[in-house]
Image: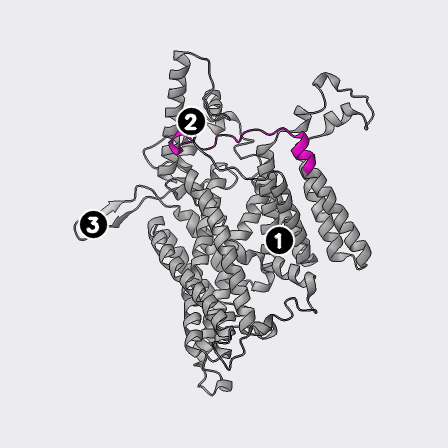
């Protein structure tokens, strides 16, 4: 529903704009730490000029360098998608090479090949510090979960993909696999280079190289982190603008977030100074608003107030995503299970089959699928008695498994709706499409782990998330409710003036009505286009395919 969409969008905003602000602030801290290197009295160097020192660290938790890097990323995105794509490709390649160097150098340093260093594989002993234990690992993983985020930004940028049906699933799976492997290897290398209690919280790898006498590697990695970290800020702002754009098409946010700007710019080809009009367009007002929001957050909000909130919002968002997958994949049991509608008796006992037939819905089943993991995590985190804690944790975990088994056994599976169109190859008979495997057990496991880690964040993070969502949903309900596509009257949905103002460029207007039943029928499940058999129906199906392809072409042209 509309409230769920708003809640999910608020969580995504935490993951993109707010997380980008946190990364910008981290970059600012690293930059100041790098500038101050060798200029402290303890190192025997000259102190920085007072004016520069005051600018870098004015106090009151203000971080000017974070605002500067966020502003620079905003300017790149205002210039255009192609320019930001070039910058992203260059920095991404540099970043991967830098991370590979840190991992290899860390393992080489920790081996017997390099003597007289603190680095040693013995720093892994004990592998789990006794003062932290399993709970400490869960707390750390939950708080720093947003450091692993970014792979879902690929989905937000699918509008820029040339072949999203093929490329987006591959990109998500490969990114998850490669990033997960690199993340674990980097953590192992860093903890082998230094005892974990000596690792710097600001510049981990550079300080670890310096502590082991590799000064050149310290300077290389310090400069490398400063160069490549802005990529995360840039992609976060870009993904947030695409989120606002999608919300504007549904009228959840004002139309300005979906308005395209077309400008003329000089091109490398052709005569010197020749200008060419931008045919794709840019979300200039959207980028300006998102950039301004990121700049303010990164400059004035301390990182300590953001990390718990971001991780909690991301975990909740992924649980919602798993539930959406189950909603698309399965039908409600009340439509397919326990007899026909004639069996329903309004006066029957609550334990009767007829009552279960009437009351059982997929929404309530999914509610249980979220409540049980949340209860399991709360028991593990807050119950002090070990016997009771482990027993209740296992009990609610078992109930979660029972819900997943019930969905697999009694909820009839349906084919995914044909969201992609003929131009993407979905209409081709025998064309393979990506489908999530091990459903519903894999989504159920994801929901369980997300809620379990969310409770490990602690009471502060959960209260902050609840307050953030309450304020956001209340503000939407007070000022924006009733204006979305879902609740707007049919006449408003077909308002061509709104469409030309919100999506289409000047001089282009109109598209098939939203409520066209033939168009909706063409998007339904199945490999064949629905309709009566015969020559007329085949011609009608071809016309529908052509109309849909034209719509999709317009969308990809102007997004």
Q: Is residue 15 left or right of residue 93?
A: right
Q: Give the residue at mark 3.
A: 269
Mark before the other along the chain sequence, 1 or 3 = 3
What distance separates the C-alpha of mark 3 from that of mark 2?
Answer: 42 Å
Tell me where residue 200 sits by quadrant: bottom right
Q: Pinpoint residue 515: horizontal percent, then vertical percent.
A: 49, 24
Determine whether the residue tagged by mark 3 lies in a helix, strand or loop. loop
Which residue is nearer to you in this view: 132 or 494? 132
Would you name the residue on which mark 1 appears? 312
Q: What is the residue that sits farthest to the left in this orientation?
A: 271
How busy is the neighbourhood of tag 1: few (under 14 within 10 Å), some, or many (20 plus)? many
Q: CA distance from mark 2 to mark 1?
A: 43 Å
Which label sits in the foreground, 2 or 1?
A: 2
Residue interval drawn in magenta: 405-429
Q: Position of residue 66 (x, y in %)?
A: 47, 64
Q: Residue furthest front?
A: 112
Assess whether residue 409 is covered by the magenta stretch. yes
Cα gap from disc 1 to disc 3, whole angstroms: 48 Å
Label 1: state its secondary structure.
helix
Relative vertical location of residue 461 with respect to residue 338 in this rendering, above or below: below
Instruction: Please report whichever mark, 2 or 1, sits nearer to the chain's N-terminal start.
Output: 1
Horizontal and vertical percent position of residue 415:
54, 29
Residue displayed at 75% across by 27% down: 356
The residue singled out by tag 2 in the image is 429
């Amino acid at each position: 529903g509309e409230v769920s969409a708003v809640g999910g969008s608020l969580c995504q905003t935490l993951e993109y704009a707010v997380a980008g602000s946190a990364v910008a602030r981290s970059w600012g801290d690293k930059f100041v730490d790098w500038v101050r290197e060798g200029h402290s009295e303890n190192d025997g160097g000259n102190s920085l000029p007072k004016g520069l020192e005051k600018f870098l660290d004015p106090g009151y938790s203000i971080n000017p360098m974070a605002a500067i890097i966020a502003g620079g990323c905003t300017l790149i995105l205002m210039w255009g998608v192609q320019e930001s794509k070039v910058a992203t490709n260059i920095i991404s390649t540099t970043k991967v090479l830098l991370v590979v160097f840190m991992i290899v150098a860390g393992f080489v340093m920790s081996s017997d090949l390099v003597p007289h260093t603190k680095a040693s594989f013995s720093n892994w002993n004990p592998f789990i510090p006794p003062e932290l234990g399993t709970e400490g690992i869960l707390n750390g993983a939950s708080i720093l979960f947003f450091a692993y985020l970014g792979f879902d930004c690929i989905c937000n940028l699918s509008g820029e993909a040339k072949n999203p049906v093929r490329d987006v699933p591959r990109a998500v799976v490969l990114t998850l696999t490669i990033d997960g492997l690199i993340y674990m290897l980097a953590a192992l290398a860093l903890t082998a280079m230094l005892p974990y209690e000596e690792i710097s919280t600001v510049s981990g790898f550079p300080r670890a190289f310096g502590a082991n006498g590799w000064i050149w590697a310290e300077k290389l990695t310090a400069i490398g982190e400063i160069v490549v970290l802005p990529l995360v800020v840039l992609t976060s702002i870009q993904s947030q603008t695409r989120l606002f754009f999608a919300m504007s098409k549904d009228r959840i946010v004002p139309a300005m977030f979906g308005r395209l700007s077309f400008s003329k710019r000089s091109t490398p080809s052709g005569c010197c100074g020749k200008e060419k009009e931008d045919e794709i367009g840019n979300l200039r007002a959207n980028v300006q608003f998102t950039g301004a929001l990121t700049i303010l957050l990164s400059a004035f909000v301390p990182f300590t107030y953001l990390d718990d909130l971001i991780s909690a919002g991301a975990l909740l968002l992924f649980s919602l995503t798993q539930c959406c997958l189950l909603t698309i994949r399965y039908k409600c049991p009340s439509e397919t299970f326990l007899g026909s509608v004639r069996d329903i008796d309004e006066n029957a006992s609550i334990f009767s089959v007829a009552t279960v037939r009437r009351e059982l819905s997929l929404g309530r089943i999914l509610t249980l699928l979220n409540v049980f993991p949340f209860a399991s995590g709360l028991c593990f985190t807050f119950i002090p008695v070990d016997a009771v804690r482990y027993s209740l944790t296992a009990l609610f975990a078992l109930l979660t498994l029972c819900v997943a088994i019930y969905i697999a056994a009694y909820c009839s599976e349906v084919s995914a709706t044909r969201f992609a169109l003929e131009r993407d190859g979905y209409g081709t008979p025998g064309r393979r499409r990506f489908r999530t495997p091990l459903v519903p057990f894999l989504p159920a496991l994801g929901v369980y782990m997300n809620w379990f880690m969310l409770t490990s964040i602690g009471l502060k993070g959960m209260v902050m998330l609840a307050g953030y969502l309450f304020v956001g949903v209340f503000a939407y309900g007070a000022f924006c409710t009733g204006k979305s596509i879902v609740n707007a009257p049919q006449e408003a949905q077909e308002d061509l003036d709104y469409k030309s103002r919100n999506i289409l460029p000047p001089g282009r207007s109109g598209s098939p009505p939203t409520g066209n039943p033939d168009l909706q029928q063409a998007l339904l499940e199945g490999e064949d286009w629905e309709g009566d058999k015969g020559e007329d129906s085949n011609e009608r199906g071809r016309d529908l395919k052509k109309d849909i392809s034209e719509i999709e072409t317009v969308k990809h042209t102007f997004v």
